[in-house]
Image: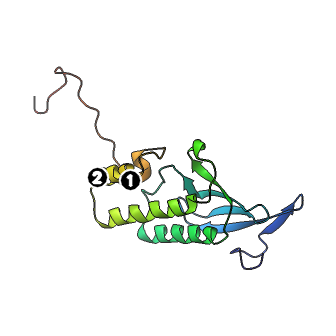
Amino acid sequence: MPGIFAVPFSCFTVYFTRYGTEKTGHTDTVDTTSLYAPDLGLIVSGDVVYNHCHMYVGDTTPASRAEWIAALDRLAALHPAVVVTGHKDPTCGNPPTVLAESRGYLEYYGQLREAGLPNQELFAAMVSRYPDWVSRQEFLILGRWWTPAPPPAEGRDAPQPGI
């Protein structure tokens, strides 16, 4: 497996099956790592790949998204048959297509951020583009820019501004 993995001596064998680790850098957190079993065509991606689950992109920057996309591309170059993700809709299996889907999510989010969409419009656009994805939470998409909306006033007895 020389040349496949970023770190020398990252390969090991368990019960005659070879495994290797791929240091994937900054994805949804710093210093993430994935496990690869070439004989099985298996990647256990940890936080690098998401499977039909809104991604924690709110605290990313253009540079960190580029690093995340590069990590996805390195994993995709391994041509896995199965990708087990750390965040997923449990009804969606473990298809390798999640690598491209995660990449597309990051690219679309980056386009919206660069366009300067207000937070609520950005959130609505992501949910509209990925309506069936689980974990539809504002803090995941908006990160440090997110502030919860005040709760709606209850009925006509609710305090009115300036009264």
Q: Secondary structure at mark 1?
A: helix
Q: Is residue 15 left or right of residue 110?
A: right
Residue 75 visible in the current orientation: yes
Name the quadrant containing residue 90: top right
Q: Position of residue 93 (x, y in %)?
A: 63, 48
Q: Position of residue 39 (x, y in %)?
A: 80, 64
Q: Position of residue 38 (x, y in %)?
A: 76, 66
Q: Is residue 71 left or right of residue 55?
A: right
What's the residue type where badge 2 is placed? Glu
Of 34 and 77, the residue lying toward us: 77
Please give the name of the residue rendered at 68% of the width and 75% of the height, measured from the top-left corner: 6
What's the residue type where badge 1 is placed? Arg
Residue 60 visible in the current orientation: no
Image depth: mark 2 or mark 1 in front = 1
Please give the name of the residue rendered at 44% of the width and 50% of the height, measured from the top-left corner: 140
Q: Tell me the residue that label 1 is attached to.
A: 129
Q: Tell me the residue that label 2 is attached to.
A: 121
Q: Is residue 89 left or right of residue 94?
A: left
Please give the name of the residue rendered at 45% of the width and 72% of the height, measured from the top-left corner: 63
